[in-house]
Amino acid sequence: MKIQGKVFVVTGGGNGIGREVVLTLLQKGARVAAVDLSDERLAETAAIAKAGDRLSTHALNVTDREAVAALPGRVIAVHKNVDGLFNVAGIIQKFVPIDDLAIEDIERVMAVNFWGVVYMVKAFLPVLQTRPEASIANVSSMGGFVPVPGQTAYGASKAAVKLFTEGLASELRGTNVKVTVIFPGAIATNITQNSGVDIPGGATQADAAASSHKTTSPAVAAATIIEAVEKGQYRVTVGSDATFLDRLTRLAPERAMKLIADQMSDLLKPAKS
């Protein structure tokens, strides 16, 4: 799919991977409607982009079904049409076992990560089907195919995105709409803060855990995601960690589970006094 001159909607456009997707699309000559929960973060994206009327910003909660249903009309009023959708917005859960995670926290993660994607797809698919060529790119996660201790509900939400996207791709085979599912590994973003999550042991322990694992920059992640859409790829992993674990999970799923459980176990341990 050619990016230049097309119109794309990007959720999570106020920070992290979503912001970099917005900026990269604009650099490639697209028009973009950036969606985020925060007006302030969207304003920061717009200030960085300096793209004039090629960028519009739309503050809304992707879990608000009525607001999402009204979004296509708002975007079309500004950009005349929509050619592609990037569902990037997502949150993680508290770093605790399921036994210690409140049902309300699980519902919140599922609402943002899964139902937000469903609402956006349902809202924009009728518009995309009218275009000569169109795309839907949904961000799942490495955690959607390999379990991470302390992120079981998050992983379940991303696994739901995985199969929802794969099913959508199956249903839209042979049509003008190409569908891509994306599996990022560890990306250097502030998703923990944006998710309102406290890590056991505080920032020091979290930073130490993160420093022991190689991360991919949001800019590299965005470039990989957009390239996949340009090529019409069915699925793509982002980062060497996601690529390695994708292969290992297929060959030896229990070994992959144990590897991640051992590497991430510190996040579930109480901080040392």
Image (cartoon, rainbow, N blue to C red):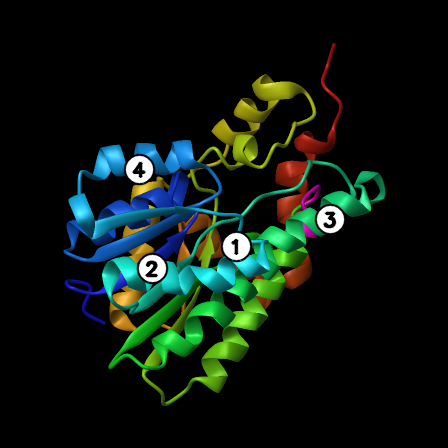
Please, what secondary structure does the residue beneath circle 1 have?
Answer: loop
Towards the viewer: 265 or 128: 128
Q: Closer to the N terminus: mark 2 or mark 4?
A: 4
Tell me where the magenta segment starts and ends, as one range: 149-153
Q: Which badge, 1 or 3, comes first in the chain's sequence?
A: 3
Q: Which mark is residue 45?
A: 4
Mark positioned earlier in the residue sequence (3 or 2): 2
Q: Is residue 88 left or right of residue 80?
A: right
In terms of secondary structure, where does tag 2 sit? helix
- Spatial CA distance of label 1 from label 2 is 27 Å
Q: Earlier in the sequence, mark 1 or mark 4?
A: 4
Residue 106 circle label: 3
Q: Nearer the viewer, residue 201 or 76?
A: 76
Q: Residue at x 24, y 48 (%)?
A: 55
Query: Contact, CB < 8 Å: mark 3 with mark 2?
Result: no
Name the amino acid type tagged 4. Thr
The one nearer the camera, 55 or 219, is 55
Spatial CA distance of label 1 from label 3 is 17 Å
Q: Amino acid at mark 1?
A: Ser
Q: Are marks 1 and 2 in contact (CB under 8 Å)?
A: no
Q: In x, y percent, where is residue 273?
A: 74, 9
Residue 140 is at least partly visible in this image: no
Q: Where in the figure is residue 175, as x and y percent of width and height?
A: 36, 87
Question: How many C-alpha atoms fall within 10 Å of the one at disc 4: few (<14), some, or many (≥20)?
Answer: many
| Mark 1 or 3, closer to the camera | 3
Q: Mark 1 or mark 4, which is nearer to you?
A: 4
Look at 46% across and 49% down and name the residue there: 241
- Above or below, comparing residue 36 to residue 256 in the picture: above
* Magenta region, main secondary structure: loop
